[in-house]
Image (cartoon, grey):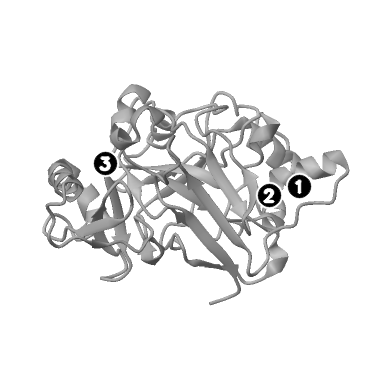
């Protein structure tokens, strides 16, 4: 099942069920007006939404309409909680070495995680507004999951059942600010302005064998101005899976329905897979004595997408243009 949110109808958008081809959709206000409302009552809402998805696939929805993916808001236009981890060791090593920081002593036994901005996300095809080009603007191609209500102290085995949706994510980062902000020891604030998520969110069962219960397998493609940057496999070279991240986040608190948890820039050790962000590319450029890959500038367009074995887009493409202040 694939779900999305039309822009409009309030700050939380309007929930729609989308067909597998990302071509047709139907509004489901009678079940839940927004995705957050559906997640709040997922036990009741999920079977009703699946029934609509089946009708849509069979052509039985008279009120279905042609879907304009570029007009969608984020599946969750805002969320009560957004947490981002860093589980791909290759990315962690390069990003830290690039800013002169050492690896944390317990990086291989305990997930790294921070709490990010969640009161408003960039639309999947929206402009990403930033105050200046001088912030060393970067992107990070990531996978994120959405949970239902998670009890405090949930163990890793039980945590897997709380993954209700999967999305792609662009985690924008101002690298010029991380170098001064992170040494303070209080984490990201200014250097992580906001993020963007894929046009649709997908239930794990709809991903088939690509979802193994802990990680999503598949090539996460990223481009800047149509130039390929990376195509790493999201199921390779990860230190921890999503159930472990959920259990880590819920160690001392419950997680509310609609909590988004990401796993950091997807990055593989295989050089042929490219890079999960520009900081990685610049690190390799420096090591090889090449001209450094430029940071993002106003007008640049970042595209992130994952396709199935037949070449069909699974989540729809993230396509964000970097722009100045709104």
Could you tell me how many numbered marks the image carries? Answer: 3
- Asked if disc 2 and disc 1 are in contact, CB closer than 8 Å, the reply is yes
Q: Secondary structure at mark 2?
A: helix
Spatial CA distance of label 2 from label 3 is: 35 Å
Please state the horizontal and vertical placement of residue 4, each as a whole percent of the image: 31, 55
Residue 24 vs 281, above or below: the answer is below
Rate crowding at label 2 as few (under 14), some (14 to 19) or many (20 or more) other CA atoms within 10 Å.
many
Residue 49 vs 132, above or below: the answer is above
Q: Which residue is mark 1?
A: 282
**116 lies left or right of 258:** right
Classify residue 265 by image quadrant.
Answer: top right
First of labels 3, 1 by sequence position: 3
Q: Secondary structure at mark 3?
A: loop
- Asked if disc 3 and disc 1 are in contact, CB closer than 8 Å, the reply is no
Please state the horizontal and vertical placement of residue 210, each as a whole percent of the image: 40, 30
**261 lies left or right of 288:** left
Tell me what residue is drawn at x 34 percent, y 56 percent.
76
Q: Which residue is mark 2?
A: 278
Spatial CA distance of label 3 from label 1 is: 40 Å
Q: In the image, which is nearer the foreground, mark 2 or mark 3?
A: 2
The disc placed on residue 149 is: 3
Residue extending furthest toward the right: 289
Image quadrant in which the N terminus is located: top left
Tell me what residue is drawn at x 64 percent, y 35 percent.
273
* Front residue of this view, candidates 48 and 310: 310
Spatial CA distance of label 2 from label 1 is: 6 Å
Q: Secondary structure at mark 1?
A: helix
Tell me what residue is drawn at x 14 percent, y 41 percent.
47
């Amino acid at each position: 099942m694939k779900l999305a949110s039309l822009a409009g109808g309030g700050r939380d958008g309007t929930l729609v069920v989308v067909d597998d081809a990302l071509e047709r959709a139907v509004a489901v206000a009678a079940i839940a007006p927004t995705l957050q409302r559906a997640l709040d009552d997922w036990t009741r809402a999920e079977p009703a939404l699946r029934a609509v998805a089946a009708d849509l696939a069979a052509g039985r929805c008279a009120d279905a309409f042609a879907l304009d993916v570029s007009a969608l808001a984020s599946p969750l236009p805002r969320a009560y909680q957004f947490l981002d981890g860093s589980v791909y060791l290759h990315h962690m090593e390069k990003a830290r070495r690039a800013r002169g920081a050492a690896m944390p002593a317990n990086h291989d036994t305990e997930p790294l995680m921070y709490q990010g901005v969640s009161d408003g996300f960039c639309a999947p095809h929206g402009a990403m507004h930033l105050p200046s080009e001088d912030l060393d603007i970067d992107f990070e191609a990531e996978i994120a999951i959405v949970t239902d209500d998670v009890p405090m102290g949930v163990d890793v085995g039980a945590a897997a059942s709380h993954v209700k949706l999967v999305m792609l994510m662009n985690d924008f980062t101002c690298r010029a600010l991380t170098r001064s902000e992170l040494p303070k020891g209080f984490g990201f604030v200014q250097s992580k302005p906001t993020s963007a998520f894929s046009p649709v969110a997908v239930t794990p069962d709809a991903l088939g064998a690509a979802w193994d219960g802990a990680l999503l397998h598949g090539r996460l493609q990223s481009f800047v101005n149509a130039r390929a940057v990376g195509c790493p496999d999201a199921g390779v070279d990860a230190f921890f899976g999503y159930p472990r991240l959920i259990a880590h986040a819920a160690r001392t608190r419950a997680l509310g329905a609609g909590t988004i948890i990401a796993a950091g820039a997807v990055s593989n050790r295989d050089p042929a897979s490219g890079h999960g962000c520009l900081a990685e590319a610049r690190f390799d450029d420096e090591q090889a004595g090449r001209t450094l890959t430029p940071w993002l500038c106003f007008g640049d367009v970042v595209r992130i997408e994952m396709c199935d074995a037949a070449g069909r887009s699974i989540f729809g493409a993230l396509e964000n243009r970097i722009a100045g202040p709104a």
